[in-house]
Amino acid sequence: MIEFLYTNAWGAFIALLMFQIPFLLVFFHVVNKKAFVDSEPSKTDPEKYSYSRYGWIAFVVVAFIVVNAASIKYMPTIVEANASTSQDVKNVSVTARSWFFEFSEMEYKVGQTVRFQAKSVDTVHSFALFHPDGSQLFTLMLVPGAGTESAVVHTFTEPGEYTVRCLEYCGVAHHAMKNTLTVL
Amino acid sequence: MSAAINIIEKVPFFGGMFKVEDNELNPVNAWPSLMAMTAFVWFAIAAVLGVSMPTIQFLDLGPNWYYKNITLHGAAMAFPFAFQLMVAMSLHRAGACLGKRADDLFVSLFYIFMNVGALLLTLAVLSGFHVTYTVMFPLPVVGVGNGQWSMATLVLGFSGIALVLTSMIFIYPIKILKMSFFEKTDDTLQVAERTLKDPGMVGMIMGVLILLVTGTPLMIVAGSLLLHLYGIFPAAWIGWAADPVVFEFVFYIFAHNLMEAMAIMIIGAVYSTLPLCLADGARKLYSDKIAMIALWILLVTSLTSFFHHFYTMYPALPSTFAYHGNIMSYATAVGAALTIFTILATIWKHGIIATPALFLILGGFVMYILDGVSAIVISNVAWNFKLHGTMWAGGHAMVVLIAISALWMGMLYYHYPLMTNRTIDDSLARSSIKYLFISYLGLFYSFMAAGAAGMPRRNGDWEGDWFIYGGFIFFFGMMMLYAFVLYFLSLTRSKAIDY
C-alpha cells in the first residue's frame, strides 16, 4: 500500500483525497450549521476551543511528518544517491535540443537498472519517461548551463515501448519532441 | 468629475456594472472601480480563451492555435485580471479603512503600466510570440534564433512584460506602503476604521513587501536584458543576466512568491471581512493572535519553499535544497491549518449572516485550501518526480488563480454598495456562486486526475485518453463560464440603494 502511494501518481491522487475530504466535511458542517441551522452565538466552553486548536495543529503536524517520512525511501534523490556506489547500474547519457533527444543507448532489458544523465544544449527542456500504460515514471528538468547534468536511476520491471517526452514548453514543436525506448 | 468616472461611463456593458456616483467618496471609489471594470474586460477575454483550448483540440485546429491561445489566456488571466482586481480591492479597502486617497499619480501610473503592458504583450502574442503562460528563459531568445518569432516581436513582448512587472513590483507596493505609513488621514474618507494592528491590514502590508523584495532581483535581471535588446547595454554587460539558471531562479523566486503574496493578502482580506458578517455583531475574529501567527508562518515559510519548482533538476539542484523546499512547503500548510482553525472557530463562536458576499469569500477560501493541498502533495520530493510537468502542475496554477479571483470577487460583492451606491442582484449572485463552486470542483479534480494519468501540461497535440480528461475540463469550463455570466448579470442588474 505504502509503495503504491509513492511509486504511482494515482497514489498522490489518493493522498490528495485523504487530506481534502475531512476538511470539506468539517468546513461544510460548521458553515451550514452556523449559517442556516443555528446562527446564534455558540455556548461552547472556551476550553474546548483551546483543546480543538492544539488537537488540530498536532494532527496536522503529525500527519505531515508521517506522510513525508514514509516517502523518504521512494525519493528519486535518495535512490540515485544510494545507487552511486553500485557497479550494476548502467549509465546512459541523454541530450535534449529543440526538438529531439539523443540517447547513448535506446534498448534495455527487464530488470536492468539505468542511471539516465540528461542535459539540454539550447533552451529549457525536460526528459520524462512514460510507462507503456501512459503513466509518468519520472521527469527531469533540464536547464542549459546548469553545470551538472540532471540524473535519475530507474529499474525497468516490464517489457514494452516506453515513451520519452519533453514536458517543459520549448516552442512551437514542443509536442513533437518525443521518442521511444524499448525494453526487452 | 474624475477621469476614472469619465472612462467608466463611456464603456458599454462593463461600464454599467461599475458606474460610480460623483460624490465626496470619489477619491476612494473612482479608480478602484475603473480598475475592477478593466479587470473584468480582460477576464471576459481570458474566460473565452480558456474554454477555447479544449475546443481547439477537439476540432483538431492545430498546435499553433493552442499555443497562441494558452499564451493569451495566461497573459490576460494572471496579471490584468486577477492581479488588477486584487489591486482595485486592496486600494479600496486601504482607502476606506485608513482614510487615504486612492486616486493619486501612483494609482493612475499603475493602471496605465498594467494595461498598456498587457496590451503590448497581447500584440506580441498575436504576432507569434507563443511562450505560454510562463517565461522559460532562454526560450524567448532561442525562438528568435530558430525563426519561431521575430526580434521585433520579442522586444514588443518583453517591453509589455516589463511594464506589467513595474506596476506590480514597484508602483503598487509603494502606493500601499505610502497609504499605510505616510499619507495623511482624511476623516471624510474613513468609512470603516481599521488600524495597522488589524490582521487584515498586516496581511496586505506583508503581501506588498513580498512583491517588492522578491521582485526587485527579477527586475534587475530582466531590465538588463531589455536594455540590451533596446541597444543601450552592450552584450558584454549582460552575460550574467542571460545565464538561464540565473534567470530561472530569480523568475521563480518572484513567480512563486507572487502567488504566496496574493494568498497572504487575500487571507488578510478574509480576516478583515469575516468579522463584519457575524450574526451576533461581535466584529472580531476568534483570536487575532492566532491569525497573526498564521500570517507570519505563511510569510516565513513561503519565501524559500519555491525550491519545489526545481527538485527535478537534481543533482544540478543539490538535494539539500530539495529537502528544504519539501519541508518549507509543508510548513506553509501549517500556516494554512491555523487559518482554517481561526475562520471556523470564528464562525462557530459567533454565527454568520449568509450573504452572497460572505458565501463567495468562504467558497473561494475552500477552493484555495483544496488547491493548496494539491500544491503540498506535489511538493513532496517523491511525488514531484511523478507529477511535475503534468496537468496536475498546470491545473494547480490555473485553479489557484480561480480561487484567488473568487475570493476577490466575493470581496467586490461586499465593497460594491460603497463603491457604486447600488446593491447586487441577490438571486443571480447565489446562482453564480453555486455554479462556480460545482464547476470549480469538477475542473479541479479533472486536472488532478489528468495529471495522475500522465497527461502533459502545455501540450498542443492531445492523444488517446487525454481527450477524456479534456472533455471533462471542457464541460466544467463551460459551466464556469456560465457562472461568470451570472456573476456579471448580478452586477449589471444591481439596484440603487434608496436611503
Image (cartoon, rainbow, N blue to C red):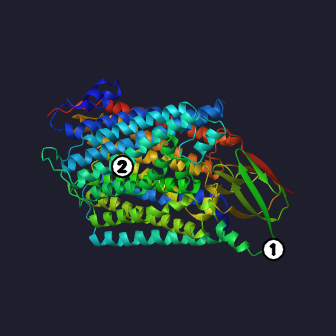
Kind of residue at badge 1: Gln
Q: Nearer the viewer, residue A75 or A5?
A: A75
Chain letter of the residue beneath label 2 in the structure image: B
Q: Secondary structure at mark 2?
A: helix
Observer able to see residue B354: no
Could you say which disc has been placed on residue A87 in the image? 1
In the image, B137: left or right of A105?
Answer: left
**On screen, B289 above or below B182?**
below
Q: Position of residue A135 (x, y in %)?
A: 70, 53
Residue B91 position (above or below residue B331)? above
Residue B121 versus residue B336 in the image, above or below = above
- Residue A108, percent across and down? 84, 59
* Left-right relation of B443 to B455: left
Chain letter of mark 1 equals: A
From the viewer's perspective, is B330 left or right of B451? left
Q: Are marks 2 and 1 on the same chain?
A: no
Q: CA distance from mark 2 to mark 1?
A: 55 Å
Q: Residue placed farthest to the bottom in the image?
A: A85
The residue nearer to you, when weighing B120 against B496, is B120
Quarter of the image with the N terminus of chain B in it: top left
Residue at image x 40%, y 62%? B298
B34 or B428: nearer the eye? B34
Q: Residue at x 56, y 53 (%)?
A: B239
Amino acid of disc 2? Phe
Residue B231 position within the rendered picture, expressed as x and y whole percent measured from the top left = 51, 41
The residue labelled by disc 2 is B170
- Label 1: how many residues lie within 10 Å, few (<14), some (14-19) or many (20+)? few
- Quadrant (top left/top right/bottom left/bottom right) for the C terminus of chain B: top left
- Image location (x, y in percent) of residue B421: 21, 34
| SS of the residue under disc 1 | loop
To which quarter of the image does residue B199 belong? bottom left
